[in-house]
Amino acid sequence: MKKRLFWLIICAICHAGSVFAGDTIIISGHPEYPPIMWQEGRTIVGVAAEVAKTVFTEIGIPYEIKATGPWKRVQRNARYGKIDVIISAYSNPERRAYMDYTIPFIKDPVSIFVLKGNKFPFNQWEDLIGKRGNTVLGESFGKEFDQFMKQNLSVERTAKVKQNFQKLAAGHADYAIIGMYPGFACAAVTGFKDKIEVLPNPVVEENFHMTFSKKSKFKHLRPKANQIIERLKNEGVIENWVQEYLNHYETKHGKKD
């Protein structure tokens, strides 16, 4: 009886190990941040998705890249362990409480977009005080600017970048705070390419990182991910993907000049 119980325990342990080995990493990302990441059908594509594919293919573990809703929900899913990895996110203290970050893989200038003809001097954050701003729900622009924005600025939030541009065109906002890459990509396919412009100085220049949920059993893979990301950066592969996916996004969604 004891011998049989011993073997049952051994089999159970082996079975648990095989289930773990066969598990799939669930990956998600921002549904509207081209060319870095955006939703197509039920998946997320773009530069960050290519980084994730390369990382987990080289590590040799199954993965699934899924669209899991708006950006705020994606972050909430990572917080509660419903997804294992976010393919690209800025770092801030709140997010670091529930996610572990890889090394950065690309810089992302955050810009002030305005309606053409409505430029104003912008040399410091204080130049935005007294003006009406807007940005996208769930966006963070680093601890310092997030705090400055909360304490000093009047900024409304919308679900999509296109809605930011629409508010500018309707005169409901004086400026929009948008990442430079998705701002240009969205403008190119929504009819705003010749209607908006960017003020010369970025608000901030943030880094994009891949993140692992602290509740994920795959978070131990982060050091291996760092090694692969570092190699991709050194080879210039990620920079090439930026232009490739800018072209892909414009072709896929149609230029509307």
Image: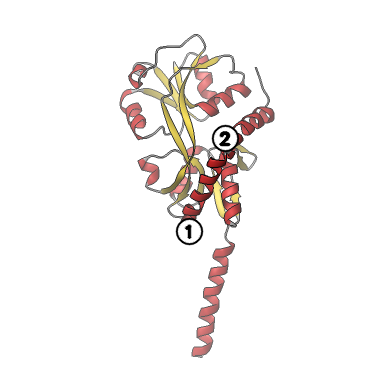
**Does the image show residue 129?**
yes
Name the residue rendered at 51%, 45% in the picture: 230
Q: Element at badge 1?
A: loop
Q: Which residue is the site of mark 2?
A: 239
**Residue located farthest toward the front when viewing the structure as drawn:** 234
Q: Residues within 10 Å of mark 1 (few under 14, many from 20)?
A: some
Of 191 and 105, the residue lying toward us: 105
3 versus 203 height, above or below: below
Q: Is residue 21 left or right of residue 254?
A: left
Q: Is residue 35 left or right of residue 199?
A: right
Kind of residue sitting beneath label 2: Glu
Q: Position of residue 12 (x, y in %)?
A: 53, 75
**Does the image show residue 83?**
no
Name the residue rendered at 48%, 13% in the picture: 171
Of 25 and 234, the residue lying toward us: 234
Of 53 and 45, the residue lying toward us: 53
Q: Position of residue 25 (x, y in %)?
A: 55, 54
Name the residue rendered at 52%, 79% in the picture: 10
Q: Position of residue 218 (x, y in %)?
A: 49, 57
Q: Residues within 10 Å of mark 2 (few under 14, many from 20)?
A: some
Q: Which residue is the site of mark 1?
A: 217
Q: How many marks?
A: 2
Q: Quadrant of the C terminus?
A: top right
Q: Element at badge 2?
A: helix
**Residue located farthest toward the top when viewing the structure as drawn:** 117
Name the residue rendered at 57%, 41% in the picture: 235
Question: Quick one: label 2 or label 1, which is nearer the N terminus?
Answer: 1
